[in-house]
Image: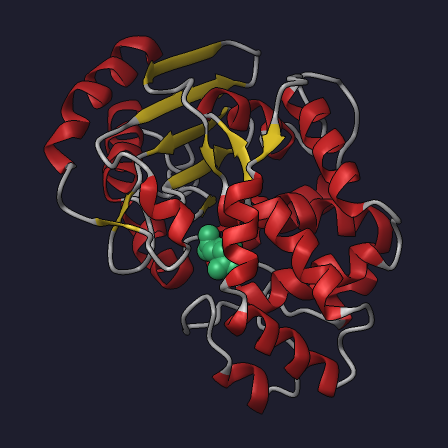
């Protein structure tokens, strides 16, 4: 079966999952999104792009941006970054403060909120216009100039910043946060509020399937070693508290966001992005997880099969 017919089949089946989850509402601007949408895009290592459903509809990338901020921080700090943020799954909610207190302000991994905030703090110590730099990076990686930040979403997040602000201040109290808390929060929220569609996301993340080199621009984004390490972290911590379930059912590194997007990668083969706004109890897209499970089944690939 061709990639296109598999994606068409998945998009046709996805509406079965509408109504089975809840759109994120803790960020009021996200609650406005029409829930009955589903998109999927897949980019192969030889540059072929396949799309089905609402693959061209933009959505809030939310936590998927944490992979991009980690990438920019690794480019600037290398392995030193790991002194400030860990590499273990957290086993707690993405916005939990409990672990941070008893682990002395060092977040478990870069994909929980506290970890992402430390990463953005590290980035801000090296770049003067963090929002502009991120937007330019994403536009270059996706080869799409029209990508924008949704200011309504980022403002809505800022107005409801209590938990993220608490995490940042707690880390400051432990000496693991150096910049002005409010400026870091502003940058972090603007990254989460980037609007992109599935087709743009598979391009932006092509470096993860290609030893660190972006397929669009043919430039090295991360070294091959760093790319393996980021993929490892995506497998163990990319799907909130359901990374084990995702590895078991889908079998690929991935990152989800509360906007309903999930980006996945089979190194050497493809990047894939699915989007559907309704989330399960772990904060992962219901139809999105179903779609990726179907995809790996239909293609008979998994990073664990040896066939990828
Ligand atoms: N901006 C969201 C927050 O800080 C990101 C959440 C997510 O997608 O996991 O709560």
Q: Quadrant of the N terminus?
A: top left
Q: Is residue 2 above or below residue 9?
A: above
Q: Nearer the viewer, residue 124 or 289?
A: 124
Q: Residue at x 10, y 32 (%)?
A: 16
Q: Is residue 42 above or below residue 84?
A: above
Q: Does residue 231 appear in this view?
A: no
The image position of residue 136, as x and y in percent, is 75, 30
Q: Is residue 268 above or below residue 103?
A: above
User: Colour scheme used in the picture?
Assistant: secondary structure
Q: Does residue 291 appear in this view?
A: yes
Q: Is residue 9 above or below residue 281?
A: above
- Left or right of residue 253, residue 103 in this image: right
- Left or right of residue 94, residue 87 in this image: right
Q: Quadrant of the C terminus?
A: top left
Q: Nearer the viewer, residue 79 or 183?
A: 183
The image position of residue 227, as x and y in percent, is 67, 42
Q: Residue at x 65, y 63 (%)?
A: 117
Q: Residue at x 41, y 70 (%)?
A: 93
Based on the displayed image, in which of its 4 quarters is residue 33 positioned?
Answer: top left
Taking the view exactly as shown, the residue that stands out farthest to the left is 16
Based on the displayed image, in which of its 4 quarters is residue 150 positioned?
Answer: top right
Q: Nearer the viewer, residue 230 or 269?
A: 230
Q: Residue at x 73, y 39 (%)?
A: 134
């Amino acid at each position: 079966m061709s990639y296109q017919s598999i994606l068409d089949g998945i998009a046709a089946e996805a509406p079965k999952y509408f109504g089975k989850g809840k759109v994120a509402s803790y960020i009021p601007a996200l609650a406005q999104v029409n829930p009955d949408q589903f998109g999927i895009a897949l980019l192969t290592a030889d540059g072929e792009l396949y799309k089905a459903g609402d693959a061209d509809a933009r959505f809030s990338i939310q936590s998927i941006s944490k992979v991009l901020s980690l990438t920019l921080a690794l480019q600037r700090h290398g392995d030193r970054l790991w002194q400030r943020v860990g590499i273990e799954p957290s086993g707690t909610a993405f916005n939990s403060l409990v672990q941070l207190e008893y682990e002395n302000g060092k977040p478990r991994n870069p994909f929980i909120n506290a970890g992402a905030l430390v990463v953005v703090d590290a980035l801000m110590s090296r770049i003067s216009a963090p929002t502009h730099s991120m937007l330019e990076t994403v536009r270059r990686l996706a080869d799409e100039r029209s990508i924008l930040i949704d200011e309504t979403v980022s403002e809505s997040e800022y107005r409801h910043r209590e938990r993220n602000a608490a995490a940042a201040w707690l880390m400051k109290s432990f000496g693991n946060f150096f910049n002005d808390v409010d400026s870091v929060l502003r940058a972090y929220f603007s990254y989460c509020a980037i609007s992109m569609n599935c087709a743009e996301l598979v391009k932006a993340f092509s470096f993860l399937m290609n030893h660190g080199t972006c397929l669009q621009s043919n430039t090295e984004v991360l070294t091959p070693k760093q790319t393996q390490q980021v993929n490892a972290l995506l497998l163990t911590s990319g799907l909130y508290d359901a990374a084990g379930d995702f590895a078991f059912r889908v079998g690929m590194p991935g990152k989800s966001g509360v906007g309903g997007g999930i980006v996945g990668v089979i190194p050497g083969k493809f990047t894939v992005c699915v989007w559907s706004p309704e989330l399960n109890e772990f904060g992962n897209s219901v139809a999105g997880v179903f779609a990726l499970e179907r995809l790996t089944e239909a293609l008979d690939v998994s990073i664990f099969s040896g066939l990828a």
